[in-house]
Structures are given as C-alpha cells and as structure tokens.
Image (cartoon, rainbow, N blue to C red):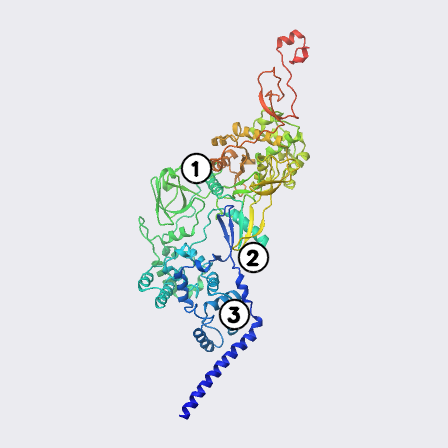
Amino acid sequence: MKFLRTLVFSALWLLVSLATASVLAVVGAALYFAPGLPDVRQLEDFELQTPLRIFTRDGKLIGEFGEERRLPVEFDEIPQGMVQALLAAEDSSYFDHHGVDPKGLARAAVELVASGGAIQSGGSTITMQVARNYLLTLDRTYIRKVREILLSLEMEQILSKEDIFELYVNKIFLGHRSYGIAAAAEVYYDRPLAELTLAEQAMIAGLPKAPSAFNPLANAERALIRRNWILYRMRDLGFIDQAAYEEAVQAPITARRHVAKAEVRADYVAEMARQFATERFGDKAYTGGYRITTTLDSKLQPMARQALANGLIAYDTRHGWRGPEQTDIPRSIAEAQERTERQGLEEELSESPEIMQTARRAAERSQTTVEGIEGDVSNWLQVLERTPELGPLQPAIVVESEGREMRVLTSDKEIKTLDWDGLDWARPYLSARSRGAAPNSAADIAAPGSLVRIMQREDGSWRLSQQPDAQGSLVVMDPRTGAILALQAGFDFDASKFNRAVQARRQSGSIFKPFIYLAGLDSGDVTPATVINDAPVVMQDGSNELWRPSNSSGDFLGPTRLREGLARSRNLVTIRLLQSLGLDRTLEFLDEFGFNPERLPHGLSLALGSASLTPLEMTRAYATLANGGFRIQPWFIQRVTRGEHHSLVEKADPKVACRDCTSDQTTTEINGETYRVAPRVAAPSSVYILRDMLREVVESGTARGALALEREDIVGKTGTTNDQRDAWFAGFNMDLATTVWVGKDDNSPTAEYGSQAALPIWVDFMGQALDGRPERIPERPEDVVERRVDPDTGRLLRDDQGGGITELFRADHLPGYQPRRVEREVEQESGSQGTGIYEAIF
C-alpha cells in the first residue's frame, strides 16, 4: 500500500513537474522571442496585395495587371459550406481552440524529433497559418514554429475568430495567380463564390495544402481524391448529411481555367495606363491596390475598335488573298509527333527506346474525333486552341475544299461551311496595286490542313478572311476638355502591341493643310476668297536637285480661290499660300497653336504635310478647331485611387475650352467641377471661317463620302502622303474630334487615298457615335459677315452688280471691290477701249 501511495505521489509530482516545465518553457520562449516578434496589431488594418486595375470613366474594367488575382471578401459573405469545407480540410476545431491545437502540435513535435529539427507537416491551425502568411517567413524550422505559436496566441487575444478567418481566406494561394477563395471561384469556375456547389467548394478547400499537386486543372485525379476526402470529413463532422455527401462525391470535375475578362476591350489604353502607373509608383503599382479610372467612354470604345477592324478588313479584301497562315498541318498528335524535329532531344531519346515508345502510346491515347470529320483530329484542335482570335477573325482549319464550297473546323469543334460568295474575293495578292486572276474553285484558295481565318457576317453566314496587311489607328477626343474618349491603335493588341496612336510618327499629308490656311486667316492677310495661282512651282530644295511639287491629279487650275483650293486639296495653292505668309511667321503661329516646332520641317514642304506627327497629335489639333480655337491637351487618366475604400491618390486637372468665357476669365465649371480655362490660340472668327471652308471639303471636295451621315454639323479633311503610303481622315463636330490613319508599319504604299482607306472608317464610327445626338453648329461670331464676291477674282460685288457667290469674311478684313465692267460698245463710244471698267469712261 505504501508502495502504491509512493508511486501515485511520484506520478503526480512528475506530471506537475512536466506541466511546470512546460509552462516555464513557454514563458521562457515568450520572454526570449517576444522582443523580435512582429506587432500583431498591424493585422487590424492590414492591406492585402491587390493588382492594378484599369477602368473606363463609367467603371467598366479594361485591364488588370499584377501577379496576384485577388477579390477580398468579408466573413459574412462566405457561404457556410465554404467555411465548413475549409474547417474540415485545415482545422476542424478552429472555433474551439485559442490559436493552437495541442494534438496537432504533439504530432508536429514527433515529426520534428524524427527529422532532426525540420518541420515536416504543420500541426498548424488556421490562426497559425495567418501568422505565418502575414507576419513571418515561410521557412520550415523550429524557431519559426515557436514564433508562429506565440504570435497565434497573441492574435487570438486581439482579433476575433471571424476576423482571423477572413484574413486567412483572402491571403491563401490557390493556384493560377488566384489568391483568396473568391478569386479562385472566378479562376476555376467563372462564378461568384456564393454560386458554387458543395463539390466545387470542397475542391477549392483542398487547394491550400498543395495548390499544384491538388490542382484540378493540372492533376485532376489527385484533386478528385482530395476533394472527396474533404467531403468525407464534412459528413463525419456533421456539417453535411448522407444525401448531400453522396451527391457531391459523384459530381464530375467542372473546373476550367478562366482568365480575367475585360468588360470593354481597350488593350492599348490599358497598357498606356499601366506604363503611367509604373512610372508613378514603381513595382508597387502591381500590388498596392491602385485603381485607375480613365477618360474612355465604354460605349464609344467598342465602336472605335469595330470600325477600325471593319475598315482594315475591307481594305485587305480589296487587295487580294495572301494565302493560308499554315499549310499541311498534321491531323493527329501521333502524326505530328512523327514529324517532330528530334534535334535537342538527343539526351532524352538516347536513354532508352522506351522513352519514344511510351510517348507514342500517350499520343495515340490522345486522339479526338469530331462529328462530320473522319478520323483523329487531335492535333488540328491543339493548333486551333493555341491560335488566338484577332479582332473578329477566328482561326479555322480547312477540312474540305471541293467545287465552290469550303468546310472548315473551328476551335469549338464545329464545322462551318463557306459558300462561294464568301470565297470569290480571294484573288491572289501580287502587290499593293495588283492582284492575280480570280479563283475558279475553293481548291484554288486553300487545301485541307491549311490554317485560315474566318469571320461571321451580319446575316450569320461565314466568309474567308485574313489578318490585314495594313494597320491603322482611330483616336476620339472631347474637343472641350481634351479627354481621350476612345483609342484603338492597331487591328488587334494580341497581333501587335505597337501603339500607333501615340508612337507612330507618320507624314500627315493634306490633313495638315487647314493649319496653314488658319495661319493665313488669323493673320488677316488672306480670306477664303483670296485668289492664288494653281500653277507649277520650281525651286531649289537645298541640294543640287530642283523641287517640282505637283497636285495629286497632275493638272493645274490656274487662279483659284482659297476655299476651292482647300476643298480640292490643291498642293500648289497651299505652297504659294505658305510662301506669301512667310515660313518663320507660320512656324511661330503653329508653335503657339500647339505643334512642336522641332518636329516641323523648316521648308515649303510643310505646306504638303511632310511633318511626321502621331494620330494623337493630329486629333488634338483638330479638337482645337472643333472647340473654337482653345489649345487643349490630350489626357486619359481621370483619377487614381487606392485600397478598398478608394482613397484618392491623384486627380486630373486639365485646362478646358470655354467659348462663353470673357478674355480675363481663368476658370469655368463643367458638371459641377471647376477647371482652368485653356489659352486661346486663334481668333473665333478665323476658326469659324476655316470650319466653314472644311464643310466645303465634305459637300463638294475630297470628303464627299461623309455626306452619307446626312448631318450638317460634321466637317473634315482627307490626307494622302507621297506614293500613297499614309491615308488619313480627320474631322469633327462640336462633340467629337476623330482622326483615322491607315498605313503599313514598314512604310510601304497602301495604294489608296485617304478618301478610300480612312474616310469609310471615320464614317462608320461617327455614324454610330453620333446616332441620336442632335446636330450642333457653332454660332457665327459677331465680327463674321457674309458678302457676295466675284468667283473669278474673289473681290466684293456691289449691290448693283449681278451674279457672284456668297463668302464669309471677318468684318475688318474685307477684300476690295470688283470694278464694274461695261459693254464693248460703251467702251468704243467713250474712247476708253481695252479698259473694260466703268470708272474709265467718266
């Protein structure tokens, strides 16, 4: 009996000693590690890393940049099934413990001893994982584990269980750039978290342990086992009943990879915004939760993108078929493998014949069939899967070309039939100015196994197409503020990321001429009725050669009024106008107007648009005409905010046009916002008269194609450069200034004029953009008057002189009167033969 009491006493003493030692060890560890521990309280205001997001002015997503895709959620937004699935997978006693799980720690301690000091598995609670992910490094050592435990105990004293769980689900990495359960729901299932099924919730809950090993996209079999184990645990823990369990474990894997979808396709502007952000904020731009709101209009941008694509495809169709993108593509993966280049695989293939044998068997097991096509087409589908769509053009592989019909396979495993009216345009391309003979059959165009492009027409039928050989740009600006409302800088960003709107400096051609005319009108030296001789010009060009500019038509009109010269885009009239104004004086005006003088040629070729300028620069210049002569500047960043509360980082402060402002007024109000007034760089009367002259270009000149819009308030100018390398149209009304450029990146000829290649794109866009908007024509300034002039001389006619045409003038810059003419009989009777003027006989 005494022995028994001694044994019990000893056992109790041992337990007390061990407990005391444990307490002392914990206290000692706390005292030792506490000074170096991070402050847990920082988690109360912790900001998660979130990617840079770019939006239109009305909040539509156009781009997302950053390694981490994250959609933070609050605890009460998490479905109960998702909470329970994570508890079953990671920490079933989470809501019962105080930050650590003794059983889990005991298991981890055993592994620690067995491994010689390296942590093998966690024993980690959700609280400990939060401590590790937010406050510690990820090294698997004893010291880190102790720090993790101490931080967890402290964390449970400061934060609620719900707050800690919220931190956990928003931080964990779940594969494919997704951080947090809400982002994972979008990436794998393309649905909000609240819409996931129980099986899908369990699948996501299985990812934190090993996002690669248990990923349903990379390791479907392993992911399925992990998912069903979690469902088994949920049933055993009483979270779900037998019926829910049986339904969920039988559910197939439905995960697919879903990339972030832009609500509005504006890739070029998104990239401009990304560059802006990195210049401002460095690498933090990608993780700091910045949100950039641009000036883009979500309705106008899709119109601009589609109009440019339509116009470039139409241009390309006119110039002929350049052939398939690829030919003789193997149908099956096994066949493709047989043709694979072996160079670079010598080491692998020399190891054993089994390597090639197993690879061949794997390829054979990959066969895929499509209804309507005989045999395995697995490689065709692989090729289509990795070939991107470009604009409205879808990749397709020719299945059959017989007679006047072509059948093609698309990436969605469908067969499309192209009838002859979708094929007969495909005459072979020979050069920009010539095509070969028309095809007689589909076989003349492409053989089976060829990769081509197809596009759907408005009536639902399909036609053959191809990636355009020419490129283009379309820029839309608000004339009042300078805000960029739409910008498409190429056929498709995936095909070419070169931003032609802001980076491509191309000769501007005749769309530059209006600014030479404006310099003359603003100086008061000329009027729209001023007559200048449209005749040959020959002069030294600065070398030993003579410069002999000509009109595009090759003819000469002789004495020509400036209005007619601009409407018909007469080169020689513009050159002589520049001569009369003086080059230095004109360059000074253009500098004040907003053109960079270093980019302008200091010679008479300036009159012909030899300056290399970007589409954005030309749009700004035409916007200044549209707003009545105020030098606004283009801008596209409306504001930058940060964090989930959208704290303002910076906001745009542009100078704007104000037609109604007095000369000493410095600010104006637009939609409740105060803006500075932009400087006026041309008299309202000069700009008004030039606008009226540009209307003549539409009504009777080179831009008559714009009459299709049936609007009186649009004006503009076509432009074509030497050898038809660049085609332009720039035009506006009071609401929108829009410029279109079409050309080739290698500067080879397009073989089309601005009225052929660029104007139809402008008309397509403006027709949609202005639909439903009332016409707006600026009021005539008080100092602009109408007078009748002689169409041959441009001089004023008196009331008693018949005929003539009406012209606009500044009231203080009227031309002289046309002398009265008399009949030859009166001359003879008066003795003043040959003068022909009324005054000479008195």
Q: Position of residue 248 (x, y in %)?
A: 34, 61
Q: Secondary structure at mark 2?
A: helix
Rendering quarter of residue 730: top right
Looking at the image, which residue is at 55% across and 39% down? 478
Q: Position of residue 336 (x, y in %)?
A: 39, 55
Q: Which residue is mark 1?
A: 436
The residues tagged by marks 2 and 3 sit, at their Cα atoms, a distance apart of: 30 Å
Q: Nearer the viewer, residue 617 or 664?
A: 664
Mark found first going from the N terminus, 3 or 1: 3
Rendering quarter of residue 454: top left
Mark found first going from the N terminus, 2 or 3: 3
Discs 3/1, front = 3
Q: Which residue is mark 3?
A: 154
Image height check: is 257 above or below 110? Answer: above
For disc 3, the neighbor class at 10 Å (few under 14, some 14 to 19, many from 20) is some
For disc 1, the neighbor class at 10 Å (few under 14, some 14 to 19, many from 20) is some
- Asked if labels 1 and 3 touch by Cβ distance under 8 angstroms, the answer is no
Discs 2/3, front = 3
Q: Position of residue 254 (x, y in %)?
A: 37, 57
Is residue 283 something one can see in this rendering? yes
Image height check: is 640 above or below 226? Answer: above
Q: Nearer the viewer, residue 6 or 104?
A: 6
Is residue 340 something one can see in this rendering? no
> Where's the N terminus, which quadrant?
bottom left
Q: Is residue 5 left or right of residue 758?
A: left
Mark found first going from the N terminus, 2 or 1: 2
Instruction: Please state which amino acid type lies under the numbered disc 3.
Output: Glu
Q: Position of residue 590 (x, y in %)?
A: 64, 37
> Disc number at residue 284?
2
Image height check: is 183 above or below 723? Answer: below
